Amino acid sequence: TVLAVEKKGQWERYLLGANLNKQPWRDLQNVFRVTNGGAAARPLPLQRSEPAPYRKLWLGALVTDGKAKYEDTVEAVYDAPRELLSEDHRAIYEAGINHANKCCFTLKKAVSDYAQVVEAETETTRAERHYWNSLDQRVPALFDAARVLGSDEFPAKDAAWTRFCEGAARAAYEHACPSETPRQIQAFATGLKRLRFSKSKPKPRNP
């Protein structure tokens, strides 16, 4: 996947990278992104239209230390709906990823608030890992929401993904922040105030 960023009137091209701490589904919005004036490009198999309702994707990368030392590999297989080739549907998927990222950011703030009260080391890494591990199991729900854009099913499926993200954040907070001693209970309540999500996230308009 070739992406591009404009700098001083020129397009700079770069390859979509991998991260050992980040499952590839969190970057699929970039894999399916529409090409931009020839500066960026989807992978070749996604540049042609096929009638199959789903596209089986294998995503992989070799991870190095930034020089020449090989460290590990990242790979995953997804049955992605072909609707993601449409920009409207892809935008729904991207909005879902953005909401997941915002919930994770809020979670880390809540864990930090908790740590300040108990005067202990923050467990943000532990909470974040628990959060994303939970959402890794829910990827088909985000695919479904993007797939049914424009149908009567869309509002319910889109809302389901929102609930999954917010519920996973609360579960991760409880996992990383015990509430047994009086001090911990006070800290837990303090951090919990941070986990107040908006009633609804901004959504792309239904075409």
Image (spheres, rainbow, N blue to C red):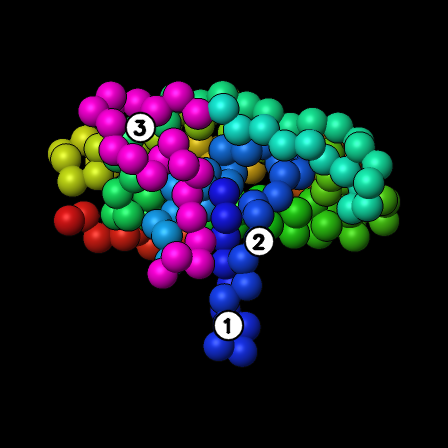
Could you tell me the amino acid type at mark 1?
Gln
Q: Secondary structure at mark 3?
A: strand
Does 45 lie within the magenta span? yes
Circle 2 sits on which residue?
Answer: 14
Judging depth in this view, the residue of 197 and 43 nearest the camera is: 43
Q: Which residue, given by chain and number where applicable, does mark 3 sit on?
A: 81
Is 16 included in the stretch rendered in magenta? no
Per the picture, the main secondary structure of the magenta-coloured stretch is loop
Marks 3 and 2, the one that precedes in the sequence: 2
In the shown orientation, is residue 134 left or right of residue 153? right
- Badge 2 marks a residue whose secondary structure is strand
* Residue type, mark 3 in image: Pro
Q: Residues within 10 Å of mark 1 (few under 14, many from 20)?
A: few
Residue 129 in picture, x, y percent from top left: 67, 32
As drawn, the label of residue 10 is: 1
Left or right for 45, reference 105: left
Categorize mark 3 by other alpha carbons within 10 Å: few (<14), some (14-19), many (20+). some
Q: Is residue 192 above or below residue 152?
A: below
Q: Residue at x 21, y 39 (%)?
A: 149
Where residue 207 appears, as percent x and y from the top left, is 15, 49
Q: Which one is closest to the eye, mark 1 or mark 3?
A: 1
- Label 3 vs label 2, nearer the camera: 2
Residue at 28% in and 48% down: 87
Q: Position of residue 147 (x, y in %)?
A: 26, 32
Of helix, strand and loop, which one carries label 1? strand
**Residue 84 seen anywhere in this rendered image of the structure:** no
Q: The magenta stretch spans which residues?
A: 37-57
Q: Earlier in the sequence, mark 1 or mark 3?
A: 1
Numbered disc total: 3
Real-space Cα separation, disc 2 to disc 1, in angstroms: 13 Å
- 207 w.r.t. 56: above or below: below
